[in-house]
Image (cartoon, helix red, strand yellow):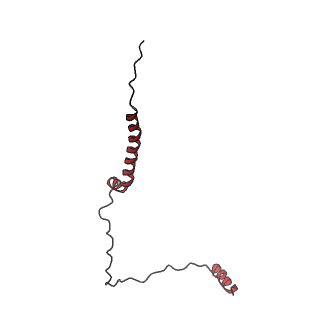
């Protein structure tokens, strides 16, 4: 039985394939990495339309009226307060 003769590819074509395919894959991966936030924004679900807008930053000349800062009441128990008093008295 006669064997089929395989056609030999030139080494130049093989070299181009071995160089172009990895470079092409790297190029596509780089572009995806570089434009990742833009790509993600296209497919990201949109939030509700009635979200509150960001507050306007005041100009330098405008006075900003701020209310007093409310601090939460300290929660130190009596036994902890006694321990702290003892530590403070011991220090010279």
Residue 40, x across and y down, in percent = 36, 54
Measuring 38% from the left and 48% from the top, which residue is drawn there?
Answer: 27
- Quadrant containing the C terminus is bottom right
Foreground pick, 41 / 5: 5
Residue 44, x across and y down, in percent = 35, 55
Instruction: Examine the rendered structure and indicate whether residue 23 appears above or below residue 48.
Output: above
Q: Residue furthest top?
A: 1
Foreground pick, 28 / 76: 28
Measuring 39% from the left and 26% from the top, which residue is drawn there?
Answer: 8
- Quadrant containing the N terminus is top left
Foreground pick, 2 / 50: 2
Measuring 37% from the left and 44% from the top, which residue is drawn there?
Answer: 24
Q: How many numbered markers are drawn?
A: 0
Residue 14, x across and y down, in percent = 40, 34
């Amino acid at each position: 039985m006669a064997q089929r003769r395989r056609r030999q590819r030139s080494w130049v074509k093989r070299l181009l394939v071995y160089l172009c395919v990895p470079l092409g894959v790297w190029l596509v991966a780089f572009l995806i990495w570089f434009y990742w936030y833009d790509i993600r924004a296209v497919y990201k679900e949109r939030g509700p339309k009635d979200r509150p807008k960001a507050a306007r930053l005041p100009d330098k000349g405008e006075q900003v009226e701020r209310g007093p800062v409310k601090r939460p009441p300290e929660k130190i128990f009596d036994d902890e307060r006694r321990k702290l008093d003892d530590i403070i008295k011991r220090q010279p």
